[in-house]
Image (cartoon, rainbow, N blue to C red):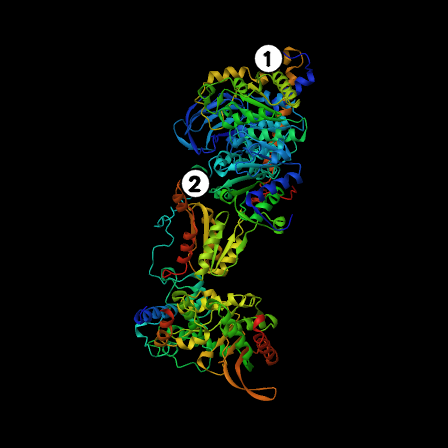
Amino acid sequence: MNREELARRILELVTEIAPDVDAATVIPGIDFRDQFDFDSMDTLNFAIALHRELGVEVPEADYAKLASLDKCVGYLSPRLN
Amino acid sequence: MSGVPASITRERGLHLLHEMLRIRQFEDRCAELYGAGHIRGFLHLCDGEEAIAVGAMQVLGSGDAVVSTYREHGHALARGIAMGPLMAELFGKRTGCSGGRGGSMHIFDAATRFYGGNGIVGGGLPLAVGLALAEKLHGSRNLAACFFGEGAAAEGEFHESMNLAALWKLPVLFLCENNLYAMGTALARSESQTDIQAKAAAYGVRATAVDGMDVFAVEAAVRGAADHARAGRGPALLELRTYRLRAHSMFDAQLYRDKAEVEEWRKRGPLTTLTTALKAAGLMTEEDFQRLLRMANEEVKAAVQLATDAEWEPVADLARHVYAEGVSS
Amino acid sequence: MLSEFRLPALGADMDDGTILEWHIVPGASVKRGDVVAVVETDKGAIDVEIFMDGIVREIVVAPGTRIPVGTVVALIETEDAAAAPVATLAGESGGEGLTPAAAPAPAEEGRREGGSTAAPSDRLKISPAARRRARALDVDVAALHGTGPGGAITVEDVEQARAAPKPSPTPPPPPPPAGAGEGGGMRDAIAAAMSRSKREIPHYYLSTTVDVTATTEWLTAHNAAVPVTQRLLFAALLVKSIALACRELPGFSGFHREGRYEDSPAVHVGVAVALRGGGLVAPAIMDTADKPLTTLMDDFRALVTRARAGRLRASELAAPTIILTSLGEASVDAVFPIIQPPQVAIVGAGAIAERPWVVDGKVVPRQLLTLSLGADHRVTDGRLGAQFLARIAARLLEPASL
Amino acid sequence: MTGPARITYREAVKQSIREALQADARVFLMGEDVGKYGGCFAVSKGLLDEFGEERIRDTPLSESTFVGAGIGAALAGMRPIVEVMTVNFSLLALDQIVNTAATLCHMSGGQFPVPVVIRMATGAGRQLAAQHSHSLEAWYAHVPGLRVVEPATIDDARGMLRAALACPDPVIIFEPISLYNLEGELTEAAAQVRLDGARVHRVGHDVTLVTYGASLWRCTAAADVLAADGIDAEIVDLRSLRPLDDATILASVRKTRRAVIVDEGWRSGSLAAEIGLRIVEQGFYDLDAPVARVCAEEVPIPYPKHLEDAALPAPERIVAAVRRLFSDAQ
């Protein structure tokens, strides 16, 4: 799965968890927490969604590596291919 | 009537006549009270059929069960229901034998095991079968006597009841009062087989036809049938041929029969028949007849007074007895 | 004696009749049972009997005229009173005097067969329960947006207009109202609830700092050992601890209404959930004390998800018997929240942070959490409040037993 | 009463009949094919050998008369259990049930109560087509003088007959055909089963499903689907269809403020219609949405399975009805 496809899938999952977030306005470099109050509950739901959709098990220690769209793509793409 | 049987004493003859006179005078007063508005709803009088009620009731014991139809005043009086409570019931008063709630077609009396009239033609037949079933299961010698008109022979319940009673050998007396007319329809226009007796044969039920106008013949036939049933040999049917001298009910223009036929049967009515026979046998005089008539009229007069003075049931009790009260099962 | 002979009632449904012919003439003698006339009825011609003996004095009604039952049709000279006819029911005589007043035909509603709601009217559509609740909470329904069937205003709409209070006295800078989605309506509701709470409830406040290092270590180990779907958040441990403390100490989980306090047998801990568009709700995790952590966590997650999607039930909002408001994420050390009436207590939790702490006489870095309690002085006092906080802390330090 | 065991609804009914026969000599079972054949739904299999022909009485196909006979025997001191194979055939005995059993006590001024128990199988679900799939409880529940009950659980199937036989009034017990094979736990509670009163089968907070008989299990299926959607349904099992337990129904509706009545009868003149109006009469100011009903389609129940299923109040239709009470947006 190439990086653009991965980014699109990730945004899909984020907006599923936070229905009131408009995917188009998400800035890849800024942490979700700062853009739209993405809290620990959202992060847990995000981790569960990643496991369900992409089959990746993200340990709690790595949550920080999922803080923004860019960090997610960087963390996930080696684990998927 | 061929004549008074030898076994009949003067006292016995007068008793039977008095019983029939009580019924006739009661019915006569009912007709008047209906016209005056005191009795309402449906009213079916049994003038002409008194000998069946009186003859049959001489045979039934207090332990036997009686099921009647909507033409039931004669059965009720002959069975021993007092005239006062009966008239109060026709007035719809609280002290009526059914609490005023049943009226003419729904007379009930637990003391005499009188399980009611029934507004539904043939409705009582299965009831009698059940009452007899219980007696059989209790192992008693009691029986269930069920009066019904020949019109009921067209109802499914007649055939079902005859079959079930015969199948289980239940002590039921099927007493068919054949007065030739089912409401406004002559028997010949409603039954392919007008001989009611022949219908009983189809179920292997013992059956005989009887002159319903002859109180002695009725008593003898019912006694024979009762002995058969009490001995456990199963049900019996009696076709009691009779004729009702009044209309089917109070609002009947009697277009279905002509006046001459009525007058012909009036001459052969049960009271005339018995009086003539008793006088011929020297067992009774005209004074006896007048005395019995006055006694009957006095009793009817007192009953009407009691019914007139009786109270209505308070509306507050309307829902009482919808379900049983204070009855442990 | 002169007796009246009236037209008799001859049937249950006979109100009147017409005399076709008379069989008697004045001067003729009659006796009981004689047929004296023939009357035409709906059912045909019927013979009419007379029930007295006597001499006919006068025929009052001639044949051919239709007369109601009970009308005097002839006068009979009778010998003695004995044979007097039975007095007919004056006035009633068969035909009921009371002809039923012609009841106006019920207006045939234009209802569709099987249609469940009447034709839409322009009147405000509001459910009966919502109307009653709006009166109770003095909410003006006209301004509300209905989410019920057909856009009807429901209790939920009314109550959300009076939603849970903003927990902290120093709320984060509220987004500009214009931009906020539903901030406006909810903002007013929060304002109303908070001012009422401040006006009516004499709050007292307590706080305590708890060394939760062991608990956070237990949590990290637990989450590492279970599949992702069964991971727990610290808040879940806190909610359970509060619920168990409520179960042990009365006076914190219940309602103060109409001047008196009722302890609630069931403990439903409400969890304050910040909505991204601004505003805040506190739906309850039902029967919190009875639920194992995994179930509790599932409910918690479902609640937050549905809260954010605006699909909470009115019952979930009305159910809380006590509320937890946690601002750990907003890195605030301590929270001193306002009680949501008619509840009588609210617990606040600040951020868990590594700070110096004295252990066995030495100062060491530990994971510390500041718990605070706002409680209603009409129901409990500081001594009991302190015990309550202590119970929560004690439970929190034995996560395995939660 | 043995400890909790798993038995079928059919077995529970049979145990209740056997217990009744053992406990009271006045009791006897009467009906079509109850003896030699062991019961059209095998409920009385084995009872003939155990109790003999006098107390397990096969009858001719004469519903009016053997039901009338049951009434007569009850009048004369017996405690008959009359089995009308199904409610469909009871139409032939309606006159005896309505004009005699239900009416006698009142019409005789209290002289003749009628302590008869009449059991009838009811309902659709076995592709028996229109004449054998009726659900006419509403007809009987309409008649003052009758008590009408419909056990939907194993405990009730086990316990209701005893309560019915102890009642001095005529009791109609409906047994849903589709439940005879239902398996479940028989508990101690069966010994204390009462004839009246509804029971909250599932506690919930957002909507009340009022139902009875086979529809109880359609409601539990619907409740599971609704739970995933965050709607917590409370289910009230009526148990008694006459008298209705208004108190329990209203207590639930006052809590949830939404009511859906699920009834396998046809909507017009149904029990659901009666219950719906009672809710509006007594709980109007507690309602947050119109009272809804989910009933059988108003058609003779068709033979083919897919049509029969479409005609009956299936869980999906219950879920849809509940959702409509929350918002059109849902």
> What quarter of the picture does the N terminus of chain B occupy?
top right
* C5 vs D76, nearest the viewer: D76
Task: Name above or below for residue B31 compared with residue A66.
Answer: above
Residue B1 — which label?
Answer: 1
Q: Which residue carries the number 2 mark?
A: D127
Quarter of the rendering occupied by the C terminus of chain B: top right
Amino acid type of the residue tagged 1 in the rendering: Met
User: Mark 2: which secondary structure?
Assistant: loop
Name which residue type carries label 2: Gln
| Residue D202, x across and y down, in percent | 52, 56
In the rendered view, does C136 fall on the left or right side of D164?
left
Q: What element carries label 1?
A: loop
Q: How far apart are marks 2 and 1 (CA)?
A: 65 Å
Q: Mark 2 lies on which chain?
A: D
Residue at the extreme bottom of the image, as rendered: C362
Q: Where is residue D189 in the image (x, y as percent from the top left)?
A: 61, 51
Dividing the picture into quarters, in which one does residue D15 lie?
Answer: top right
Q: In this view, does D47 lie to the left or right of B180?
A: right
How many residues crowd around disc 1 within 10 Å: few (fewer than 14), some, or many (20 or more)? some
Q: Which one is closest to the eye, mark 2 or mark 1?
A: 2
Which of the two residues, C255 or B293, is positioned nearer the viewer here? C255
Mark sitting on residue D48: none
**Same subunit under labels 2 and 1?**
no
Q: How many marks?
A: 2
- Residue B109 visible? The answer is no
Q: Which chain carries label 1?
A: B
Q: Residue A10: where, in percent of width, then height?
A: 35, 70
Residue C203 vs residue A37, the one in the foreground: A37
